[in-house]
Image (cartoon, rainbow, N blue to C red):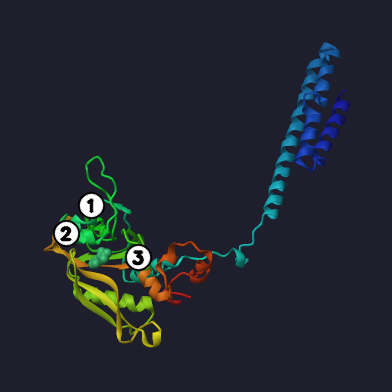
Amino acid sequence: MTADLAAVQAELLAAVESADTLDALEAARVAAVGRKGRLGALMKTLGDLPPEQRRDYGQSVNALKTAVETAIDARKARLDGAALDARLAAERIDLTLPVRPEAEGRIHPISQTIDEIVQIFGQMGFRVAEGPDLEDDWKNFTALNIPPEHPARQEMDTFYLRAGADGARPVLRTHTSPVQIRTMMTEKPPIRVIVPGRTFRSDHDATHSPMFHQVEGLVIDEASHMGHLKGCLIEFCRTFFEVADLPVRFRASHFPFTEPSAEVDIGCTRAGGEFKIGHGDDWLEILGSGMVHPKVIANCGLDPDKYQGFAFGMGIERIAMLKYGIPDLRTFYDSDLRWLRHYGFVPLDIPGALGGLHR
Ligand code: PHE
């Protein structure tokens, strides 16, 4: 009888070992230890044995069962490992292959321009701050020294939303300047931030879009003055437009939230019908700036006798159009793939001062 069991064990183990797929192994398992398998059949013969032999025989069959099951587990682990290896080999991706040209996307000129601006001011020690598109009236206007009756409110062509429970009407921010307020209310000077983002005005023609982008700059500390403002913005204009001796002019202006205020023009020429940035006989306005008004500093809970600084704001579409020769503002938002392939930027061509800012 014992010799018999040894032969059965050898036979079942051989079947397990020769199973070369998980399906074949499962078939071998069912044939051996399944409900109608060989070991079950052996157990059924137990009743035919003389009682004194039953215990030994039962134990032997159980030992045989354990041996077969252990072999099945080991075999299964090996087949699982081999299956995983095969899958990994089949799904292998060669990360060193170049991108397929037909699968290449393009960076939108607005994103590219924001990246360039952040890069340039980043090198001067500015960090990026952001604020929400939806603002309360106080941060968009009142805290910036634009009281309810101020004419600037009308000039801004503001989109107002329905009044909330408190009766106040939220606005789609008309400029990025409310982020000046947010920053001064939450941070201790020295402050040096650059704020790119969406802005909204109810205005729509070839040179105006109801949604456009601005970038705000804010510097607040105990010593920054108009000379710093000028140096900082001249440096920005020359680096951004990649004209080392670009003429930059500061023209006295007015904003409720800065005093004194200056608009910044860059030199250009339209000689021979061709527009060019650089030396010439013409000027082009590209941004607004000024020393932050003491009232604005006080509105944010900071001491205007201790802290001072400057702010500036510019339209991103406008400087992108100038730098990259994009003639129509509305094309920025058309989602026209041919336009994007023409004016867009290669994804891995990240702006950096070293390699030049653009292609
Ligand atoms: N917020 C102004 C605008 O939208 C620009 C500006 C910002 C001017 C900061 C001065 C200082 O026109």
Q: Dot 3 lies on which element?
A: loop
Placement of 323 over or under 176, stated as above or below: below
Residue 321, given in percent of the width and then of the height, sits at 40, 72
Label annotation for residue 208:
3
Residue 311, given in percent of the width and then of the height, sits at 24, 67
Q: Quadrant of residue 102?
A: bottom right
Q: Residue at x 32, y 75 (%)?
A: 236
Q: Residue at x 11, y 63 (%)?
A: 305
Q: Residue furthest left?
A: 305
CB atoms at circles 3 and 1 under 8 Å apart?
Answer: no
Q: Residue at x 85, y 12 (%)?
A: 50
Q: Which residue is mark 1?
A: 137
Placement of 26 over or under 265, stated as above or below: above
Q: Earlier in the sequence, mark 3 or mark 2?
A: 2
Q: Dot 2 lies on which element?
A: loop
Q: Residue at x 30, y 79 (%)?
A: 266
Kindly report the distance in space between the C-alpha atoms of the residues bearing marks 2 and 1.
Answer: 13 Å
Between 172 and 259, the residue placed more toward the observer is 172
Label annotation for residue 150:
2
Kindly report the distance in space between the C-alpha atoms of the residues bearing marks 3 and 2.
Answer: 23 Å
* In the displayed structure image, the side of residue 32 where residue 341 appears, left or right: left
Q: Dot 1 lies on which element?
A: helix
* In the displayed structure image, the side of residue 38 where residue 175 appears, left or right: left
